[in-house]
């Protein structure tokens, strides 16, 4: 593929992402306030209006397969423990918080989400702000790093009754990246626009009243936080697939 | 890379003389094209020799500090004008295109024809254009001579895997003879090669433990490469750009006879046959000495197992070697180079200790531009092993 | 070594999910089933069947495939289980020069999910690792394999024969992504609900 075609694909994705976010405003006007909020179902990704104070939480695992351009043969795919919580706020808003824990590196995000519903169809607009950090002091490494990210997102959902399906689009942005090698510190504003992610998630009862989240997220990005210690220097969009599994508590 | 061969105009030009080439080398100010290539660039010549060992091709490389950008140009003179044609590329992404330059007769062309040209600021001006992809060059670029290249300290710019990785999207495969011949254009002074031993004891160049699609074209063969004989690999395996897997001897032969490479770091990936490797090292270093050619081959020791094997060689104390382990292990094996990982920092006191013992220190594998600048400015290493030789070359040669 | 570590971690993670699931939730009236699928059929390799450049060869992309799968089926739509089996990927023989033959196959080990519609239609999806294997016959024999991460998607139509047994026809796509090996299989399977509580 020619170089300019690859860059064009990145530009197209950027415009698609912006377009989708702008498109989210239209349903907000069409749907208006939507349906009244309540405790809702045990769903975290599916857009649903929660009553103020209502809360749902899930615990599970996520696993990303970084691209071979970065990891080459050294492909250790450690899953991250994933803790996700949703807290209802007034006027269709909720607070979406998430933590990904791998001990040596971890990420915490929090952000508002506004939801509107019309029957089984719903959509949400959100903006998650995340902080990640990692440290590696073993076997020739004396490294640590941290950074800030922002992910504006839009989700569309359809509740089939016995299963809720959600399609989510996120714009991936890096606000900062700071790394340390021994005594040296290096700061970088990194790439403000890093890429885009698309997720397809099913949430449904698994056994008895226990609900399960099962999802697949496709990231097309220049930087993914879990790979900080590989110090990738590529200025290219690479594909990172992610599996999401969670038990809704 | 855009297609730049079959240039009719270049075929009409006359070759540069050695004096012309050495006069052109230097640090240049960017007059036009700063948004793409930064404010200064470094220019340096390299060469490669054809397989018949008689035809030599010279290439002028221009190293930019922006996104590991570089030009590779070939040229000649037409009357008193110097003509250059080639391509440019940014290694961090896939931006590339055709480039062309000229040094007009009044912009240094006439001066360069002198027997001993006096070169100073603005005495040589490159004016030209560059394009995108296979498109015609349509954006202006110009460089004006600023000062000579930095040569106060001898420094090794070592190309990882003979010059670069598969993921750097170079036109040749990593750890191939083609890469050995291509990579001097990227500004390196030496190469690192990854050596493994086939099932029948032949030392070959191959990085990964397994035959995989990162390094090779699909052939239905998988598994540990050491489980295959050399004949099986030659018959069935092609590297990603179609080359055959070379032997260590083939790579050293190409480096010694066909390139200006002066330093080879042999990185042993498994339990190598170090006695065989030592005999190959001695043969090629003796040949280089007989040719009057500066050419070091260092046996690299990355693990304790290989260290123990190295210490059983009867002449290990006189075998030029490089140690990636501790400073004590470096002393134990009598290595002339200590090679710590770059992620351990500049380690100024440890480096000073090694220098006091008469050893050199090379760090690996550093690709982050900010850290390269810091390590050159604040560190005291004798070399950097990198996938981005153009970037290290830029920061090194533009030092003051 | 690192792929084995990833495989172990994946198995531990799956074990955690299944075990945590089994021990959580309130007791009540429900039916849980363990269902086995055993079957075989034909496989067709649909990725690029690479052969060495410069070698003219006879390539065969069709071959046998077998599947062994055990699913835990709770009372809702979704069930979960483990799948393995064996699939021929492709093979080739040189048609000129020295005699040479390569046989390339895989054994998948996948964690699969299934959603069941109208009691007959099952949609499967899963991820895991395939053990891809080369058998080379050229100046000696080499029989060796490696792990390749991948995913699987399938749909099957199940016809009950009795309260606990049935027969199914399954169309499956299995993709060992790292080694770029994709195959479509069409299989007939024996379905057995061998345990219920």
Image: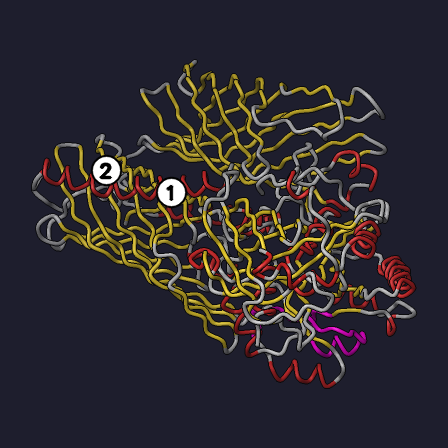
**How many neighbours does mark 2 have within 10 angstroms: few (below 14), some (14-19), or many (20 or more)?**
many
Who is closer to the viewer here, B153 or C137? B153
| B322 vs C132: above or below | below
Residue position marked by numbered label 1 in the rendering: A217
For mark 2, name the chain.
Answer: A
Find residue A106 and report its horizontal and vertical position in percent: 40, 61
Which image quarter holds the C terminus of chain C?
top left
Please name the residue shown 34% across and 41% down the image.
Answer: A198
| B96 vs C64: above or below | below
Please name the residue shown 81% across and 66% down the image.
Answer: B294
Give the total of numbered labels.
Answer: 2
Who is closer to the viewer here, B119 or A218? B119
Q: On the picture, is A246 further left or further right than A20?
A: right
| A244 vs B122: above or below | above
Magenta stretch?
B323-345
Please name the residue shown 73% across and 47% down the image.
Answer: B176
């Amino acid at each position: 593929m020619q170089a300019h075609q690859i860059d064009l694909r990145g530009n197209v994705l950027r415009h698609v992402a912006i377009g989708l976010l702008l498109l989210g405003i239209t349903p907000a006007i069409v749907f208006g306030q939507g349906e009244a909020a309540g405790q809702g179902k045990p769903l975290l990704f599916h857009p649903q209006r929660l009553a103020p104070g209502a809360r749902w939480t899930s615990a599970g695992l996520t696993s990303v397969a970084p691209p071979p351009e970065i990891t080459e043969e050294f492909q250790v795919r450690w899953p991250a423990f994933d803790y996700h919580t949703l807290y209802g706020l007034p006027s269709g808003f909720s607070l979406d918080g998430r933590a990904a824990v791998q001990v040596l590196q971890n990420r915490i995000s929090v952000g508002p989400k506004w939801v509107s519903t019309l029957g089984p169809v719903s959509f949400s607009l959100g903006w998650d702000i995340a902080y990640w950090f990692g440290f590696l002091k073993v076997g020739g490494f004396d490294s640590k790093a941290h950074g800030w990210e922002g992910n504006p997102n839009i989700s569309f959902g359809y509740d089939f009754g016995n299963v809720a399906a959600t399609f989510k689009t996120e714009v991936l942005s890096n606000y900062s990246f700071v790394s340390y090698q021994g005594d040296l510190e290096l700061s970088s504003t990194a790439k403000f626009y890093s890429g885009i992610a698309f997720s397809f998630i099913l949430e449904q009862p698994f056994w008895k009243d226990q609900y399960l989240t099962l999802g697949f997220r496709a990231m097309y990005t220049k930087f993914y936080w879990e790979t900080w210690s590989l110090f990738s220097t590529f200025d290219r969009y690479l594909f990172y697939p992610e599996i999401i599994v969670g038990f809704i508590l | 890379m855009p297609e730049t061969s079959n240039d009719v105009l270049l075929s009409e030009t006359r070759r540069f003389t050695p004096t012309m080439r050495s006069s052109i080398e230097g640090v240049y100010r960017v007059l036009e094209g700063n948004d793409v290539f930064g404010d200064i660039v470094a220019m340096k010549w390299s060469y490669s020799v054809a397989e018949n060992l008689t035809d030599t091709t010279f290439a002028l490389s221009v190293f930019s500090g922006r996104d590991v950008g570089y030009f590779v140009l070939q040229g000649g003179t037409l009357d008193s004008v110097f003509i250059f044609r080639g391509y440019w590329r940014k290694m961090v992404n896939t931006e590339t295109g055709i480039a062309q330059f000229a040094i007009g007769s009044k912009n240094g062309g006439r001066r360069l024809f002198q027997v001993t040209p006096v070169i100073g600021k603005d005495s040589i001006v490159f004016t030209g254009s560059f394009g995108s992809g296979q498109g015609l060059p349509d954006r202006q670029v110009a460089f004006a001579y600023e000062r000579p290249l930095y040569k106060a300290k001898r420094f090794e710019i070592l190309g990882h895997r003979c010059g670069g990785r598969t993921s750097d999207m170079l036109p040749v495969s990593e750890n191939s003879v083609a890469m050995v011949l291509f990579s001097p254009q990227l500004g390196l002074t030496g190469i690192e090669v990854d050596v493994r031993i086939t099932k029948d004891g032949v030392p070959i160049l191959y990085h990964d433990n397994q035959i995989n699609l990162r390094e090779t074209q699909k052939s239905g063969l998988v598994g540990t490469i050491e489980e295959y004989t050399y004949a099986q690999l030659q018959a069935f395996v092609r590297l990603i750009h179609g080359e055959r897997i070379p032997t260590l001897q083939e790579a050293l032969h190409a480096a010694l006879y066909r390139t200006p490479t002066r330093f080879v770091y042999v990185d042993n990936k498994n339990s190598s046959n170090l006695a065989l490797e030592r005999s190959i090292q001695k043969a090629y270093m003796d040949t280089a000495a007989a040719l009057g050619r500066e050419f070091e081959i260092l046996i690299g020791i990355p693990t304790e197992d290989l260290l123990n094997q190295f210490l059983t060689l009867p002449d290990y104390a006189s075998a030029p070697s490089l140690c990636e382990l501790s400073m004590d292990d470096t002393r134990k094996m009598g290595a002339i180079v200590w090679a710590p990982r770059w992620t351990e920092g500049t380690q100024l006191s440890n480096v000073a200790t090694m220098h006091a013992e008469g050893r050199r220190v090379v760090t690996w594998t550093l690709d982050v531009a900010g850290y390269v600048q810091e390590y050159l400015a604040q560190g005291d290493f004798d070399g950097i092993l990198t996938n981005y030789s153009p970037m290290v070359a830029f920061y090194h040669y533009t030092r003051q | 070594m690192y792929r084995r570590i990833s495989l172990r971690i994946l198995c531990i993670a799956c074990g955690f999910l299944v075990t945590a699931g089994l021990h959580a939730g309130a007791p009540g009236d429900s039916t849980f089933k363990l269902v086995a699928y055993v079957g075989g059929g034909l496989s067709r390799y649909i990725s690029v069947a690479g052969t060495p450049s410069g070698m003219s060869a006879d390539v065969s992309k069709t071959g046998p495939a077998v599947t062994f799968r055990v699913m835990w089926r709770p009372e809702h739509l979704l069930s979960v289980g483990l799948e393995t089996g064996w699939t021929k990927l492709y093979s080739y023989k040189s048609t000129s020069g020295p005699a040479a033959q390569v046989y390339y196959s895989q054994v998948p080990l996948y964690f699969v999910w299934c959603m069941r519609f109208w009691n007959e239609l099952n949609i499967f999806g899963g991820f895991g690792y395939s053990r891809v294997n080369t058998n080379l016959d050229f100046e000696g024999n080499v029989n060796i394999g490696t792990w390749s991460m991948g995913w699987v998607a399938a749909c099957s139509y199940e016809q009950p024969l009795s309260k606990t047994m049935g027969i199914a026809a399954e169309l499956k796509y299995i993709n060992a992504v790292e080694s770029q090996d994709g195959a479509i299989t069409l299989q007939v399977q024996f379905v057995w609900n061998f345990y219920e509580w």
